[in-house]
Amino acid sequence: MSAYFTPQIQKRFIKLMLILTVVMFTIWTGITWYNNSVPGDFEVRQGDIKLSDGYYEEAIERFDAALADAPNHRGALLGKGVALMQLERYDDAEAVLSHSIEFLLDTLTDDDPTGIGALSAAYANRAIIKDRQGRYEDALADYIESLKIDYDIGEGPGWLNHLLYYDKTPSSALRRAEYLYQQLQLPEEERLMRVPEQDDKQRMYKP
């Protein structure tokens, strides 16, 4: 063995090669992900984090950044709609959701379950806006459209969200639609359209 390639140097060489391999693999993975990612996806993921943390204005900024790259990115549209709803900017939220619905109706295919879920969520969220504004018949129509498209959404959030956020079974699109329908059959003076302690449990949807 050469005096210049002692066991100590050999160990250092092997360690250096391992580090370089990890670095190159990380770079390659990042480049591959970037090349294969859909424009706007990264910003939507950032927006989703902000949305989950309750930073709604910052979430909107991230969703707008995604929409600048992909004007009809459905994840960005749905996320922005939810953030605007949380800020009670209902007119703006309804405009975003209505645009999302129109775009999805024009482009959706039967073999696109994610898109179907997005369309159902857009209808459900728009129904919640109309519901909160006292536009009950229009809200019921949107709840029904949501349920017709994707009945699963009528069962409300999944068990994980239930565990994290709810003490009791949450109000869902299906339950609210049933309640509105029953109340709208009654004479107007007998209707009880709002039950705050139950209505407050209703959650917005984002696929």
Image: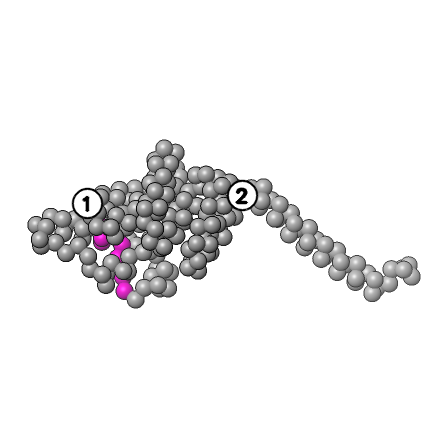
In the rendered structure, does residue 171 fall within the stretch colored magenta?
yes
Q: Is residue 145 visible?
A: yes
Quarter of the rendering containing residue 193: bottom left
Residue 16 vs residue 206, the one in the foreground: 206
Q: Is residue 38 visible?
A: no
Residue drawn 49% across the image and 41% down it: 68
Report helix, strand or loop for mark 1: helix
Report helix, strand or loop for mark 2: loop
Residue drawn 27% across the image and 64% down it: 168
- Tell me which numbered mark, 1 or 2, is placed earlier along the sequence: 2
Residue drawn 30% across the image and 42% down it: 149
Mark 1 crowdedness (10 Å alpha carbons): few <14, some 14-19, many ≥20: some
Q: Which mark is residue 160?
A: none
Q: Which residues are magenta?
A: 168-177
Mark 2 crowdedness (10 Å alpha carbons): few <14, some 14-19, many ≥20: few
Which mark lies nearer to you, 1 or 2? 1
Marks 1 and 2, how far apart at CA: 41 Å
Residue that mark 2 sits on: 37
Q: Which mark is residue 137?
A: 1
| Amino acid type for the residue under numbered disc 2 | Ser
